Amino acid sequence: MRHPTPSESLATLTWLQALLPTAFSIAGSVVLIACALHVRSDHTNRQPVITYAGPLAEWMPGIAWLGWLLSFIGIGFAIGLLGHSRSRKRIAIYAGMYLAIANFVWGLIYVAALLED
C-alpha cells in the first residue's frame, strides 16, 4: 500500500476538522455575549462612561479580548482549511468563518451603540 502524497492527505478533511472554525467562532460568541451582559453605560455626563458590573468586573476587558481572539482563531482555521477541502464540508467551514466575522461586526456595532451621545 502506498502512502498518500501531501496534497492527497490534505484533501481529505474529516468533519471534526471542518467544524473547528465553527467551534471556535461559537466559543467566541459565547464569551462576547457574556461580556456584553455585564456592560453598564452611564450617560449622565457629557461623555458616556462604560463600566463592567458583576463579580468578574475587573477581568471583563481581558475576557472580551479572549472572545475576539477565539473569533480570530476561527477565521484563521477557516482560511487554512478552505484550501484543503473539496466537498460538502466547505459549508461548515464557511459557517464558522461567517460567524466569526459576524462577531467582529456586531461587536463594533455594540461598542458604537454604547458610545453614542
Image (tube, helix red, strand yellow):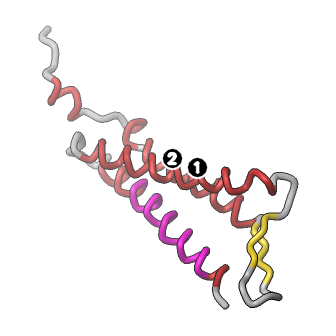
Q: Give the residue at x 51% y 46%.
A: 23
Location of residue 109 by image quarter: bottom right
| Residue matched to label 2 | 24
Segment tinted magenta in the rendering: 96-112
Vertical arrangement, residue 105 with respect to residue 88, above or below: below
Q: Please, which residue is most extreme toward the top here?
A: 1
50 magenta-colored: no
Q: Position of residue 11 (x, y in %)?
A: 21, 35
For badge 2, the amino acid type reads Phe
* Quarter where residue 111 is shown: bottom right
Q: CA distance from mark 1 to mark 2?
A: 5 Å
Q: Secondary structure at mark 2?
A: helix
Tell me, yes or no, whether the highlighted magenta stretch contains residue 103: yes
Marks 1 & 2, CB-CB < 8 Å contact: yes
User: Which of the labelled discs sits on residue 27, or is there none?
Assistant: 1
Query: Up-down: is 54 above or below 14?
Result: below
In the structure shown, which secondary structural element does the residue marked by tag 1 occupy? helix
- In the displayed structure image, the side of residue 62 where residue 1 appears, left or right: left
Q: Position of residue 70 (x, y in %)?
A: 52, 48
Depth check: give the residue in front, 48 or 98.
48
**23 relative to 32 in the view: left or right:** left
Crowding near the residue tagged with mark 1, few <14, some 14–19, many ≥20 C-alpha atoms within 10 Å: some
Measured as percent of width and height from the top left, residue 27 is found at 58, 49
The residue under the point 28% across, 49% down is 88
> Mark 2 packing: few (<14 Cα in 10 Å), some, or many (20+)?
many
Amino acid carrying mark 1 in the image:
Ala
Which residue corresponds to the image point at 79% horizontal and 64% vertical from the top-left?
Answer: 52
Outermost residue toward the front? 46
Viewer-proximal residue among 14 and 84:
84
Residue 56 in the image: state x and y as whole percent: 81, 52
Q: Main secondary structure of the magenta part?
A: helix
Look at 79% across and 54% down and name the residue there.
58
